[in-house]
Image: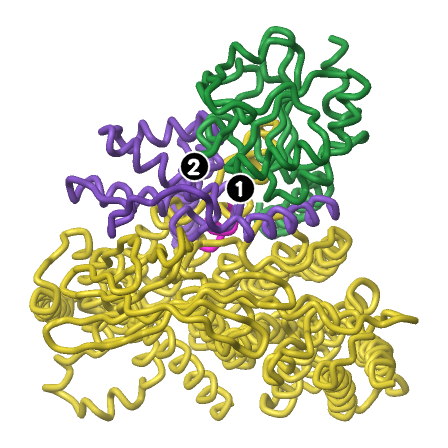
Chain colours: A green, B yellow, C purple
Amino acid sequence: MKKLIDILPLVIFVILIGVLFSFLSNKNNQLETVLIDDTFPKFSLSSLEDDSRLLTQLDISELPALINVWATWCIACRVEHPFLMKLKRESIIPIYGLNYKDNRRKALELLKRDGNPFEFSIFDFEGRLAIDLGVYGAPETFFIDRNGVIRERHVGIVDDKIWEEKFAKYLYE
Amino acid sequence: MTPEIGHILLIVFLVLSFAGGFLPLTSVYLKNQTFEIPIKKLAFSLFLLIFLSFLSLVYSFLIDDFSVAYVSQNSNTNLPFYYKFAATWGAHEGSLLLWILAMNAWLISFMFLTKCSDKNFTNAVFSISCQVMFSFCLFTLLTSNPFERILPIPPLNGADLNPSLQDIAFTIHPPLLYFGYSGLMIPFAIAVAAMLFNVDTKEWAAYSRPWTLLSCSFLTLGIALGSWWAYYELGWGGWWFWDPVENAAFVPWLLSVALFHSLIASQSRSVFGKWSILLSIFAFATSLLGTFLVRSGILTSVHAFALDPERGVFILGILGFFVIGSLLIYSLKDFKKDEVKPYQLSSKEFGFLLNNLLLVILAVSILFGTIFPLIYEAATNGKQISVGAPYFEIILFPFALALGLLQGIALYLSWGVTSSFNFLQRLTLESVSLFGIILLVLFILFDNLYLSSFATIFLACWIVAGTLQVSKKRNLNYWNFLKKRLAVTFAHVGMAILVLGVGVVTSYSIEKELILTPGDEFEFGDQKITFQSIEDTLGPNYFSKSANIIFEDEKDISSVVTEKRTYTPSGQLTTEAGIVTEPFQDLYISMGDNLEADIWSFKVQIKPFIRWIWLGALLIAFGSMLAGFNRIQRS
Amino acid sequence: MNRISIFCILISLSFGNFASTDKDYDFNKDAYPFESEIKEELFYSLLFELRCPKCQSSNLAGSNSPISNDLKREVYELIKKDKSSDQIKTYLVERYGNFIIYNPPIEPATYVLWFGPLALILISIFSILFFRKRQIQ
């Protein structure tokens, strides 16, 4: 009994070290996505291309699809842009843009210059839909399956590797 | 050339500290004189080596030698020279050098100031410390060499020191904190040596006490300075955020406070011998653990260092080696029974026991809360939570209350048994009258009383009354009585002042976010705030928008400047708050965003008694330093 | 790891450029005017309790990032709509998860967090008293 108490601190400490060690190897840098396995939130916002055209969740009609959160002030988005263009070019999956807290004129100029990978872009100047989606930075990408359910989300640049790791599997479901 | 010299000195240090780490112990165990080495000389040479190595890094910073990777990452030609100097410890690699330097300084001070009766004991302390320094040095050389060069083409200019570190408080804050952390190596080494040589509890506790007190004093100063820095530099007027890094410093602080209290009992009454040993080990362990949490990147934090999992593994290895090693000795050893005089529940011993219990469980809870989000994520398969200020405040409150109540009666208790609790009457009377006075003052100052602050304010009065014991004035020479316990008086009154500051500032603060354009006025509390003008100013390595603000009330007018700085090398933004300090309150304003043309958002706050928090902390640090020096003189 | 940190830098840089937009400010000097003090207090206390999802090491009160300004606006509007503190928290948790609140929820997985300290105190007090009794005997 007496001895047992003497060993207790050692045991506790070894467990602590083990736990900390396990944290070292699996570090996740992304926030959890609450909306996974939920339908895409309702919204009603104007289109980037046409001020007077009102878009709702029903306009995201070609499914499965990607929703990509982008903006002209987001430098990482420009790094990601060619990959989105490639998806578009090879008709792998339709992409809908969510233009996030941006300047409409600048955004249209950028699409004109670098190409437009999106079916259309939702113009979310105040970041309202973004909040409903739990967006906290750009770029962010959501995968919507054929039933309109959000299946996966990636924060940061999507490239071939991320596409294969996170998204491709949902395409062939 | 200089970086190479520094590098070589560090390698020599590694070799010598390795020798120092096992030769003296071997000679003791083999009872063989051939392995004996002059440890004082060795300690000095080690110090010289690490000091010169450190200086050579300082030199590389001062001459802008950007071929040194560490310099190029943390300095810039436009950086003022005092920040170049401070940049030496501004990031991971250099701070490790400073850490080793601090450990070495502690070791030398111990060897020259604490006279141990047994030479073997000193040898053992020296050896264990050398092992710790060796492992840190190895860590530095293998994973974080500050002298690494970028060759053949060095960059023309450096990336600059992190702008939020370009600040007076932040140049002194890390050294103080590192001295605090590393100082805990001495109690650790003493505890292990005491186990190895079966030293009497009374004896080793006497050796350990001053060094625990001094480390605690440095930790207090470091933490207080960090809190002050956060207050004016992070731009939202918070002084304690319960950020992982802050907790990582707070936990060893709590344990060091627990340790020196327990050592008092160990030294005076031979009690809690094993407990003090465990505490010494864990105080040191948590100071390493803090380093691990901050530098491995497993937790997100304001003050995070450049992150590297490999470093995390290494620190964990060091931590595991020393702590598991010493706990193994602890669990295998047959402690001889100390002659302990029995004590009652009403005794001073039991008071110390309660104090330790509360402090240690509080420390464990804070540590657990800090890493809990990781555990939760692993246990729930990816769900995330945050454990922050609201949680820690809820947890802290009952502990603080219990500790404060105990602190108030602590100095009345006697060893063995406290014969009479008659003092409670006087204590209550004194603290209630003090409480009344303070409420009156608060009411006069702020026209308001908040029920929510009563508990903390009363607690502060209780501690002050219990520490000063004014009623003793009648029957003995009061000033002599106080003079004899000057250190504890300072420290405990400091605690009371801190508690008072916290209580008032949490209840009485007011704040608002404003949108103003030059010429605008706004009534806030009893202040009229005028946004006078905005100008562009230019610093040595930044440009800024400075807003001139005037605070005006019935009595005085004061003007302050709050700035939004853009540091040119990195493009990073910082906010410099404008603060008017009055005796009883701070008027605080910080600039937010530029909304349009000349329209700016501001955050304005009135924070009564906030300075008292740091004043209290200073008194605590002073008290424990005084106690530490007193103990050194006596031993 | 590295890519993510570069990404973060890019994000923060790009937010740095994102200072002004073409919105007209019909501004009130009080950035968040309320009709009652209780609501105002609720607002500022919520800012302390909510975590900025982008900067992650500060609360909404301490952050000037665009996302936290948006969230402040959201909280403000919800309070104006007479939503209670709990309703607002639920609203945000439905979008950002419990991560966004610095105060963890009380649920089976967090019992150990919330009641652990108390349990430790009770266990140690009882064991001290128990051992003392045995020693005296």
Residue B364 sits inside the magenta stretch: yes
Q: Mark 2 points at which residue?
A: C104
Q: In which quarter of the image is the N terminus of chain C?
A: top right
Q: Is residue B276 left or right of residue A72?
A: left
Which class describes the residues within 10 Å of circle 1: few (<14), some (14-19), or many (20+)?
A: some
Using the rendered image of the protein, determine whether residue B343 is visible from the camera's viewpoint: no
Seen in the picture, residue B560 relative to B374 is either above or below; the reply is below
Q: Where is residue A144 in the image (x, y as percent from the top left)?
A: 62, 16
Say which of B4 and B517 sits in front.
B517
Query: What is the quadrant of residue C85 in the picture?
Result: top left
Is B301 rendered above or below residue B459?
above
Q: What stretch is highlighted in magenta?
A: B363-368
Q: Which of B14 and B267 is in front in this view?
A: B14
Label 2, secondary structure: give it.
Answer: loop
Give the percent coordinates (x, y) of residue B573.
53, 61
**Label 1, on which residue?**
B372
Residue A71 point in image, percent of width and height: 59, 37
Which secondary structure dominates the residues rendered in magenta?
helix
Residue at the spot 56% in from the left edge and 64% down from the top edge: B283
Tell me where residue A61 sits by quadrant.
Answer: top right
Kindly identify the amino acid type of the residue bearing the numbered disc 2: Pro
Residue drawn at (55%, 29%) of the image: B383
- In the rendered structure, the answer to whether residue B379 lies left or right of residue B489 reads right
In the visual, does A63 lie left or right of B489? right
In the depicted view, which residue is nearer to us: B582 or B308?
A: B582
